[in-house]
Image (cartoon, rainbow, N blue to C red):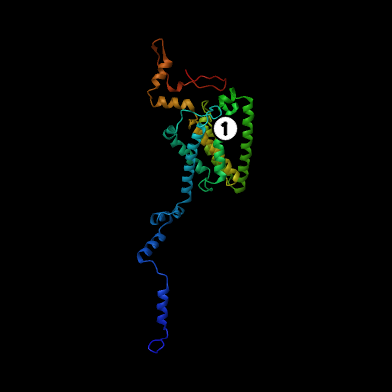
Amino acid sequence: MKGGVELVPTHDDEEDRAWLAREREPDEEKQWLDEAAAAAPSRWRCLTQPLTPDTWRFLPTEHVRLLKFMLVSYALVVATHAFIRAHASTDKWERDERYSLDEFHLLDLHPCALDALWFFVVGRYWRRNGVDSACFLGPCVLGAYVFSAVGSWPVTHESISLYAIKCVWPRAFVALLGGVVALVLALALLHVWRACKDGLFGGRVAEIACTVLIFWLPRARDSQFHVHHWFLTWFIGQHANQDAWWSVASSGILWGGYVNGVAAWGRDHPLGCKASYYASENQRCGYMECFEHRYYVVHNATAMPPPADSFEASDWRHCGASYAP
């Protein structure tokens, strides 16, 4: 009502009210940035948006899983190294007292990272659930503990090599090893059954044959080949790569065995002293002069040192053992 005249809303007045009542749109610059971020490829979206917890969801899942696997493995090595050395008993908690984390970083971090990468790929952890799941992490911690806790059993002090099998192993150790082998075979049959069910049997057999050809055959014929438990658990664990919980748990406990071996003793070379001898001779290390002087200087008469291939190894065929000429 204005001056006695009633004003009737027109169509234009209704549009004006609707325009004033609407939610305010962002300014043109912010709207342009949002559209540009939405149009960017998902892999680069983290560069065009603020860093928030949601940013990580734009990273490829495989990259996040590899990062978590590497970090969890490193943390377990450090924690297991400290845990083992916190016990006074070196009989039950066997370890190399001289092996420090500095030596791990200097000598073993690089090969261990390659081991972890190979395990991650062959073990299908790039498509499995993350390693922070209880089904993997629980058995992994258990494996890191058990492989040292059984050190109080005298029978577990025997090594695994051709010489030890033929000449050293007691019957009790053979029985224990038989039980372990039976358990491994049962799990292997489960993996075979699952691979056949999923139509993956041929590919898995080819995969195992390839890894045996690379990591076992070149060394197994040498009498100095020593199967450290880090090597054995690493090799078997990578092939426990089915999605079933028992496969994930098997892989976890074996990866824990690998972690335990590295944390307690270091990642010793499977050929042991032979590899060290060859590397020292081949690179003409200065300390080899002391070795030659110790063994080849007799009555002040120096004999010509033999070539590197004259290294006399232990012979498992007749239980001979001589590590020095």
Left or right, 191 with respect to 7, comes to right
User: Is residue 280 visible in this depiction of the protein?
Assistant: yes
The image quadrant of residue 12 is bottom left
Q: Is residue 10 above or below residue 224?
A: below
x 62%, y 34%: residue: 181
Disc 1 element: helix
> Could you tell me residue 89's position as x and y percent?
54, 28
Q: Is residue 18 above or below residue 62?
A: below
Q: Is residue 133 above or below residue 271?
A: below
> Could you tell me residue 216's position as x and y percent?
52, 33
Q: Residue furthest top?
A: 299
Viewer-closest of 136 and 194:
136
x 54%, y 38%: residue: 256
Q: Residue furthest left?
A: 29
Q: Is residue 314 above or below residue 186?
A: above
> Could you tell me residue 131's position as x and y percent?
52, 45
- In the rendered image, the quadrant that contains the N terminus is bottom left
User: Is residue 236 visible in this depiction of the protein?
Assistant: no
Q: Residues within 10 Å of mark 1 (few under 14, many from 20)?
A: some
Left or right, 167 with respect to 37, comes to right
x 40%, y 21%: residue: 288
For label 1, the residue is 149
> Could you tell me residue 36's position as x and y percent?
38, 61
Viewer-closest of 143 and 322:
143
The image quadrant of residue 193 is top right
Viewer-closest of 317 and 5:
5
The type of residue carrying mark 1 is Ala
